[in-house]
Image (cartoon, rainbow, N blue to C red):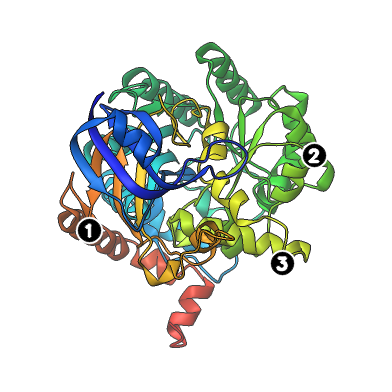
Amino acid sequence: MKVDLLIENGHVLTMEGDGVGFIEHGAIAIKGNRIVAVGHREEVGRNCRAERVIDATNKLIMPGLIDAHIHTGFAIFRGVAQDMSDWMQKGIWPFQKHLKPEESKAGSMVNIIEGIKAGTTTFCDYDGRMDLLVQNYKKIGARARIAEMVNEIPDDIGDLPVGELYEFNPSIGEEKLKRNLDLYEEHHDTENGRISVILGPHGPDMMSLELLKEIQNYGEKLDTKLHMHVAQGDREILQMEKRYGQRSIAFLEQHGFLNDRLLAVHLTEATDAETVQVAKSGASMIYCAGSIGIIDGLVPPVHSFLQAGGVACLGSDQAPGNNCNNMFNEMKFAAILNKVKLKDPRIFNATQSLRMATIEAAKVMGIEHEVGSLRRGKKADVILLDLGDPSFFPVLTKPIRNIVPNLVYSTRGHEVETVIIDGNVVMENREILTIDEKVALAKAQNAAENVSKRAAFDILNSDSDILAMVRDGLL
């Protein structure tokens, strides 16, 4: 069989089966944008003639990582809202109210570059003005499953006192829903299927029941997922109780949202009973360990969700809260924080973390038939890591294998050397091949500085903890 690319002589993690699908001295063959063979190097090599061969000796071959929840449009605010209370109102809002769409787009591209260089091949981006941000994915060649963040919140929401009930603006909601539907019409299943679109209700506290129901109806009509923050913080719960006299999950259950369409992001404030209820409903959970750890100092109930039979995966969330949109960071934090929370080192092992950034994430997003594992017929989203890097040392395969524990607990993402997305080599030898990385970084840096200049008055009057630390010479 003639193929376009043969990668051979590496250790392979297919992520097939219940574990990691380890193949020692394995190979993978790619034709077009599909995997046509994966197995032992001798078997695959015997049956394939390749236009190009990559010798993966002392490399790890595995599926590209999936970031199931990321807001790349927020990347331009990285590092402005940590170690503080009311991070959204006092940290992000003074900047965000001055942000222009093109500046958000410039920051988004750098966020995507960051993810690709750390092995992320699928970005489940959930943001405003996705009609602009989607162009970044098309240009750089990444896979994206995107949603416009739909709400009815006025532009001055950040100026409201903390705890005050939001005032909805239906015209804002209809405009944002239209953008989501237009996004679907124009971009869904484009770029050879690399770009797909789902629906993005911001949260049950961010819009009227009427708009939520409208989105629900479109979800059924288009047969697609609803990417939504659920029980993401005490602010949301307070808003729901004031407006409806119910907590978020009871409200969603009453109105028919707890089903397999729902991608419930965070569940930070969910009680044990609510967590089990969501898990048993068929809805999935997206857990953002680093973000919620930094923003709230909490560990969402992902372990209880999994124990109740739910399907969950990992996301990195947004740069201002998490700082790091790197799935190696998320795998490590997810495992360690749950071990500490539950006081049991056996909880949340490395294999579970890795699966939640690959095949389980694909299941949650409804794309497991295409990506998430290395199997004949799936899309060719593949990454190669350098097993010769000190972070992998020592590499042992007998009598035990330590590659996966070192991958989760030791690596930092720089070990990723090659990234293949949809059969195309997007990064090789740590160099992005599809865009000029330095130009993208310079453009985004200039945009960030311009936003900061325009926002200076609001920043200096924000009464934020981080501003106080700057004034005290602590930053």
Q: Position of residue 92 (x, y in %)?
A: 46, 58
Q: Secondary structure at mark 2?
A: helix
- Single out the mark in the foreground, 2 or 3: 3
> Which residue is the site of mark 3?
340
- Measure the alpha-carbon separation of dots 2 and 1: 43 Å
> Which residue is the site of mark 1?
441
- Single out the mark in the foreground, 2 or 1: 2
Q: Amino acid at mark 1?
A: Leu
Q: Is residue 455 above or below residue 186?
A: below
Q: Amino acid at mark 3?
A: Val
Q: Is residue 291 above or below residue 154?
A: below
**Image quarter of residue 416:** bottom left
Sooner in the amino-acid sequence: mark 2 or mark 3: 2
Q: How many marks?
A: 3
Identify the residue at the far right of this view: 273
Q: Position of residue 253 (x, y in %)?
A: 76, 28
Q: Is residue 359 visible?
A: yes
Q: Secondary structure at mark 3?
A: helix
The residue under the point 50% across, 42% down is 358
Q: Nearer the viewer, residue 325 or 75?
A: 325
The local crowd at label 1, few if under 14, some if 14 to 19, many if 20 or more residues have their Cα within 10 Å, is: some
- Single out the mark in the foreground, 3 or 1: 3
Q: Nearer the viewer, residue 161 or 434?
A: 434
The residue under the point 15% across, 55% down is 439
> Which residue is the site of mark 2?
276
**In the figure, is residue 404 to the left or right of 381?**
right
Q: Is residue 86 visible?
A: no
Q: Amino acid at mark 2?
A: Val
**Image disc number at residue 359:** none
The residue under the point 37% across, 55% down is 118
The local crowd at label 2, few if under 14, some if 14 to 19, many if 20 or more residues have their Cα within 10 Å, is: some
The local crowd at label 3, few if under 14, some if 14 to 19, many if 20 or more residues have their Cα within 10 Å, is: few
